[in-house]
Amino acid sequence: MSPHAPDQAETTERREARLQRGRLEARLAQAQRLETIGQLAGGVAHDFNNLLAVILNYAYFVREQLPEDSELRRDVDEIRRAAERASDLTHQLLVFSREEAIEPEVLDLNSVVREAERLLRRTIGEHVRLVTRLAPEGCRVSADPSQLEQVVLNLVVNARDAMPDGGTVTIETARVDAAARRNGLPESLPPGPYVLLSVGDDGVGMEPDVMAHAFEPFFTTKPKGTGTGLGLATVYGTVTASRGEAEIESTPGGGTTVRIWLPEASAPGHGE
């Protein structure tokens, strides 16, 4: 053995330790940035919700005072619909900021995907192929059912939008034992059994600077008027509220995969 081998091994270990420390610091900085944005978004959303409630109440009141055949009723209905769309946006902001009340229950992630599959196929259209590879065993997690379904829908829609000329969206689930070895588990999560949801596409991919901001609210690379920039933000809010983590792997021109890690629930009624 070369007398320099130990030094080389030590240098390799130091380099790997430095790289890992850099990844951890970057992840921590991103989490802190998203936490700060979440606090600001939550405060703004609460204020807007109060204002929108007043607008909606007055719109309903004015409409009821108008004669049935009044053309003004259509104008009031437009006001109401606009306020309801704005209310939906503030709801998404509250989900991102983790201030929206959730009602978690133990459920099977595979069942959530299967039940949403018909809607997903209609949503992505004929030019995009949907492939599902679900774990053969159940993938029990503790989460809000409607919000978890929305996570799957948002990820699939985001993948579809990354493939304007068509392609394939792949949904995969797996149980991951990260108790003894981390098995790819994000450093922010403690060791243990997890359920992994992956949604991948073979679309345009993301540049590193885009990927760094992908979970921030109102951040979007889509043309103006074609997206709110809240899809991935609400995914992040829902997942972190469920004690999980979301991460993105992407290569420009090589597609994107979003991975959702959720703690595995041991049995129905025992999600903690």
Image (cartoon, rainbow, N blue to C red):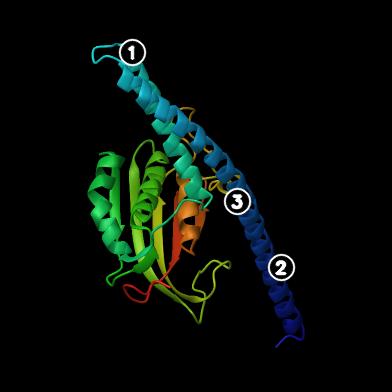
Judged from this view, the residue extending furthest toward the front is: 65
Residue 137: mark: none
Question: Earlier along the polypeptide chain: callout 1 or callout 2?
Answer: 2
- The crowding category of the residue bearing disc 3, from other C-alpha atoms within 10 Å (few below 14, some 14 to 19, many at least 20), is many
Question: Which residue sits at x=71%, y=68%?
Answer: 18
Do tag 1 and tag 3 residues touch (Cβ < 8 Å)?
A: no
The residue sitting at 44% across, 54% down in the picture is: 101
Q: Amino acid at mark 1?
A: Leu
User: According to the image, label 1 marks what residue?
Assistant: 72
Q: Is residue 13 left or right of residue 237?
A: right
Residue 68 percent across, percent down from the top left = 24, 16
Mark 2 lies on residue: 18
Quadrant location of the N terminus? bottom right
Which residue in the structure is indicated by mark 3? 34
180 above or below 161? below
Q: Identify the secondary structure beneath mark 2.
A: helix
Query: Label 1: few (<14), some or many (≥20) within 10 Å?
Result: some
> Mark 1 vs mark 3: which is more N-terminal?
3
Closest to the observer, 252 or 195 = 195
